[in-house]
Image (cartoon, helix red, strand yellow):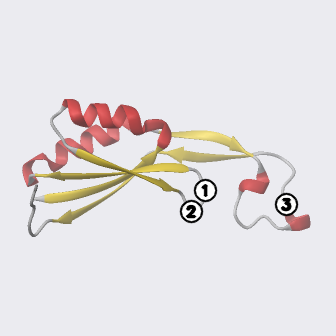
Amino acid sequence: MKLLFAIVSDEDSSILADNLSRDGFSTTKLCSSGGFLKSGNTTFLVATDDDRVERAIEIIRDTCKSRRRMIAPEKLPGSFGSFNMAMPVEVTVGGATVFILNIEQFLKL
C-alpha cells in the first residue's frame, strides 16, 4: 500500500478532488502555501493499493497543468531595494509535486 502526497495549486484542487473521487480514490485535503511565491496550494493525501498508484498519478498529471503567469517583481523572493526589476516577470505556476511513500500499516477506525 502507498501514500501519495500531492501538492497542487488551489486553482486545480476542486477538479482534482472530483476526478480522484470519480475514480474511487479517497482523499484528505490540507490547506498549504507555497514557499516560492507564497501562493495558495492544496496538499492531497491519497492512500491506495500499489497497483492503483499509476492511475492516481495519471489523474493528477491530467488535471494539474502548469501555466505561465505574470507577477509583480516585488512578489519574487530575493527582490531588494534598488535591485528590483521594474517590469512584471513571467513565471511557471501550477502542476503538481507528488511524493510516494510506503505504508507499513493502514487503519480506518
Quadrant of the frame with the C terminus: bottom left
Read off the residue under disc 3: 84
Mark seen at residue 35 = 2
Q: Amino acid at mark 2?
A: Gly
Residue 65 % position (x, y): 44, 38
Residue 106 % position (x, y): 10, 61
Q: Nearer the viewer, residue 59 or 28?
A: 28
Lateral position of residue 10 relative to residue 81, left or right: left
- Tag 3 near tag 2, CB within 8 Å: no
Label 3 crowd bin: few (<14), some (14–19), many (20+), radius 10 Å: few
Residue 40 % position (x, y): 54, 49
Residue at the far right: name it.
82
Q: CA distance from mark 2 to mark 1?
A: 5 Å
Describe the element under mark 3 as helix, strand or loop: loop
**Image quadrant assignment for residue 75:** bottom right
Q: Amino acid at mark 3?
A: Asn
Read off the residue under disc 1: 38
Q: Amino acid at mark 1?
A: Lys
* Between discs 1 and 3, the one toward the N terminus: 1
Describe the element under mark 1 as helix, strand or loop: loop
Lateral position of residue 65 relative to residue 18, left or right: right
Q: Nearer the viewer, mark 3 or mark 2?
A: 2
At x 57%, y 46%, the residue is: 92
At x 78%, y 53%, the residue is: 73
Residue 42 % position (x, y): 43, 49
Q: Is residue 26 above or below residue 1?
A: above
Lateral position of residue 70 relative to residue 39, left or right: right
* Between discs 3 and 2, the one toward the N terminus: 2
Q: Nearer the viewer, residue 104 or 57?
A: 104
Q: Is residue 16 above or below residue 30?
A: above
Q: CA distance from mark 1 to mark 3?
A: 18 Å
